[in-house]
Amino acid sequence: MQTPRRTGARRRAVPLIASVSALLLAGCGALDSVDGGGSSASPEKGDDITVGLLLPDTDTARFEKFDRPLITRRVTSRTHGKGKVRYANAGSSAKTQSRQFAQMISAGTDVILVDAVDSKAIAPEVRKAKDAGIPVIAYDRLAEGPIDGYVSHDNELVGEVQGRAIVDALGDKAATSKIVMVNGSPADPNTARFHEGAISELKGRVIVAKSYYTKDWLPEAAKANMQKAIRSVGLGDIAAVYSANDGMAGAVIDALKEAGVHKMPPVTGQDADLAAVQRIVAGEQRMTVYKSFLLEAAGAADMAVAKVQGKAIEFDALAQDSVDSPTEKSIPAQLVPVVALTKDNIKATVIKDGVYSVKDICTAQYAADCAAIGLR
C-alpha cells in the first residue's frame, strides 16, 4: 500500500505538552489575521455556511465523545453562531460513507471534512465534490483525490513513540524478547505510517514474532488475532504487544487475561480513551498516545471555515506543513503534536487539558490504583 509522504514538516519532540487553551486562543488570533497572506484569495462566503462532517466509526470512542462536539462548537464560534454542521457516521462501512458523501454534495454543503473509512475508496466522491466547487478537508486520515487540506498528527511519530515505549519497557531484555504487533486497518493510510514509525524503533532491538493487520480497526478482529498469536508464540514467550490503538489494546488485554496471563506484558495504545487511561492507572496497559482532540478538531474547523471564506490556509499557521498522498502532491497540512501518556503524566495531559477529570478516571474500581500513584 502506498503511504502519504510528508514534505516540509518539522519533527516534534515527543515530550511536548502544550496548553491547549493557550494554543486555541493563539489559533483564533491567527485565523482572524488570514486575508490571503498577499495572495489574490478573497472571501467567497460570510458566516452563514454549512460544514459537512463525515466520521468513520463509532467503535473509536473519541469520534462521538470529542471530535464531533468539538468541531460543531468550533464552527459555531468561528462563524458568530451562524454556521452549522451537517453530520454523518459511516459505522465502519466505506460504502455507507461514500453514500453519505454523495448526499452532502447533493445537499449543497459548503465544505466537507472527511475522516475516511477507506482512503482510496472515497477518492471518486472527493473528485465529485471538487467538480461541484466544494472544498474537501481530510481529517485525521489522509484521503486520496484532490483534497484541499489535511489536519491530523505526525502519524509516523505516533508509531515511534509506541515503539520506543516497548523498547524502554523491556530494557536490557529487549534484544531477546518476542513481541506481537497488532496493526490497524490496511484500508487506513495512517496504519502504514504508524507501523513505519514503530518499526523504526523496534527493528534490530526486539524480535517481532507475529504481526497482524486488523480489519476496520475492529476490537473483535484484534482479539482473534491476539488469540492466534498466543497459540503460535506461546503465552509465556510474549514479552510485549504493540497495539496501534486503545480499542484494540483493550481486546488484546482481554485475550491475554482469558489465556491466563500471570503478569501483563507491556501493551501500547493510542487515542487516550478513558478506558485505556484507567487501564494505565491499573497497570494493565503500558501507555497510550495522547493526541489533543481539541487542537485537531479546532484546526479542522478553522481550516474548513477559512476555505469556504476564500482565505489562503497555506500562508498561515493553519497549514504550516505539507504532505503527499498517492494521488496529490504538496497538500497543505496541519500536524498536531503527540504525547506519550503514562502513569507519570496523566495530570499534565488529559486532566490539565480538561479531557477527563480525576472523578472520571478514578471510579470505585480504580480508586486504590489512583491513590497509589497520587491521582486524587
Image (cartoon, helix red, strand yellow):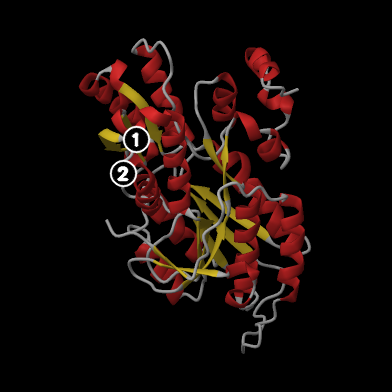
Q: Residue at x 31, y 44 (%)?
A: 203
Label 1 packing within 10 angstroms: few (<14), some (14-19), many (20+): many
Left or right? Give the position of 51 relative to 143. right
Q: Which mark is residue 182?
A: 1
Quarter of the picture holding the N terminus: bottom left
Q: Which mark is residue 203?
A: 2
Amino acid type for the residue under numbered disc 2: Lys
1 or 2: mark nearer the eye: 2
Q: Residue 132: x, y in percent?
A: 47, 75
Left or right? Give the position of 220 relative to 150. left
Query: Could you tell me if residue 94 is visible in this image?
Result: yes
Q: Residue at x 71, y 52 (%)?
A: 73
| First in sequence: mark 1 vs mark 2 | 1
- Report how many numbered discs are placed on residues in the image: 2
Residue 239 in the image: above or below residue 163: above
Residue 162 in the image: above or below residue 51: above
Quadrant of res 145? bottom left
